Image (cartoon, rainbow, N blue to C red):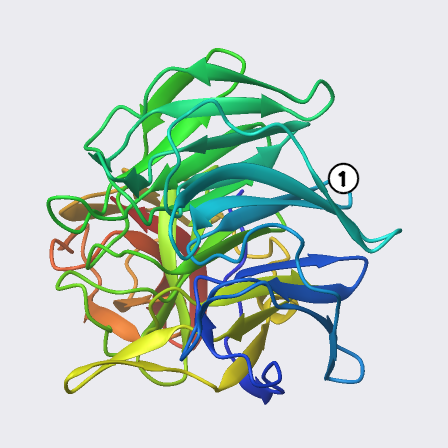
Amino acid sequence: MLSALPSFSQEWESVTPPPDFYTDHTYGFSIDGMGYLVAGTTEFNGPTKAFFQFDPVEDTWTTLEEFPGAARGYGIGDVWDRKAYFGFGTSVDSLLRDLWVFDPDSMSWTQLSSCPCEPRLHPTFVANHGKIFIGLGNNNNGNQNDWWEYDIATDTWSQKPDFPDTKRHHPYQFAIGDYVYTGFGHGNGIFREWYRYEPVTEEWLRMADIPGEGRVAGTQFSYNGKGYVLSGDGDDHTSMETGEMWSYDPVLNVWDSLPPHPGTSRWAPASFVIDGVVYLYNGTTTVSGGNAYVSDAYSFDLKEMVSSETIPVKSANYSVYPNPFSSVVYINSLAGDYDALTIYTLDNKIVYQGRYASQHNVSHLPAGLYRMDIRKNDTVESILGIKQ
């Protein structure tokens, strides 16, 4: 059984931006229903220690005591067990490899053991099952592909098998279940490859590439068993025409396009998720002569498109095979001939229409999840199909 098609009736909504804090490469996180933004590179003053808290009920910001470590841009972090872990990046005059933890109960930061790896800018950084995994990124020696594990309980680091593809920086990343996922980014090009890391076996596995353009330096998160990548630059390392958002289903190993945020995409924005609502802040966009910092902030309610498993893979009266399919899809009817086949994207756009036949050429469709409607007189039956 596959999930039902999500509804896209909701839209991105404007929210209050952080006060006088327009940055790129700020780390955003949420704990106990509150959002936070820390550090980043500001529009005029370079790396910062600024630290803010967001109340989603009041849509207001509070300025907190500054982050006690070095002011930085290109830092990165993740949350595990109600604590936020943060580090790496660059200060005014040096690259960093430090690690800090924020405790919302005491509203304080504590420095932990630094990584024995080389310092670097904005690597992969994922917390999962009491461990933190970092790797990739870049430094004075160029792009990296090493991979390290930090044990939160023992405050110790150990090196693991390298990321198996081209060295790169500004990747995307998140954890779902027992696995860590990372990929995209850039090095000698902008990449689309996506990988899964299994911490128990220490093995890497290549997963489905993201459709369309490669992308670099966006933001990402996981929610309700799926991963999401949001915004960033495209193949030419400039803003994409729309603020793209994609979801990744780890069970089906497929990417699905979701409603983009307003405006063009952003380089190095920040985000966090509170009660199923994702909030997007800051970053820069490509303009004539360079980049411009963004002050608009938006939210999007993911709960409204969470599925309820109502549309099956198989119908009582027909089946689609193979499923997943590639260039040709076959329909096996158990109840006589139908009138027509219509295929829809997840946002209800028609991408194929044809009179009913036992086979249909769908080679033009990009990889993804589709609703397939077969009509007979006034009756329509729907199932889900996966295009590889």
The quadrant of the rendering that contains the C terminus is: top left
Question: What's the residue at 27%, 32% (across, down)?
Answer: 144
Q: Which percent across, then down, holds residue 223?
A: 60, 52
What is the count of numbered marks?
A: 1
As drawn, 365 above or below 318: below
Q: Residues within 10 Å of mark 1 (few under 14, many from 20)?
A: few
Q: Residue furthest top?
A: 201
Q: Which percent across, then down, holds residue 219?
A: 44, 59
Q: Quadrant of residue 307?
A: bottom right
Amino acid at circle 1: Asp
Dot 1: what SS?
Answer: loop
As drawn, 168 above or below 164: below
Question: In this view of the protein, which residue sits in the foreground, 292 or 193?
Answer: 292
In this rendering, position of residue 290 left or right of residue 175: left
Question: What's the residue at 54%, 81% (across, down)?
Answer: 298
Q: Which percent across, then down, holds residue 129?
A: 66, 28
Q: Which residue is mark 1?
A: 81
> Could you tell me if residue 275 is visible in this image?
no
Q: Quadrant of residue 25?
A: bottom left
The quadrant of the rendering that contains the N terminus is: top right
Question: What's the residue at 12%, 49% (across, down)?
Answer: 189
> Could you tell me if residue 49 is visible in this image?
yes
Question: In this view of the protein, which residue sits in the foreground, 43 or 309?
Answer: 43
Question: In this view of the protein, which residue sits in the foreground, 194 or 44?
Answer: 44
In this rendering, position of residue 82 left or right of residue 201: right
As drawn, 136 above or below 39: above
Q: Residue furthest right?
A: 105
Q: Which percent across, then down, holds residue 28?
A: 58, 61
As drawn, 75 above or below 175: below
Question: What's the residue at 22%, 29% (across, down)?
Answer: 165
Question: In this view of the protein, which residue sits in the foreground, 189 or 97?
Answer: 97
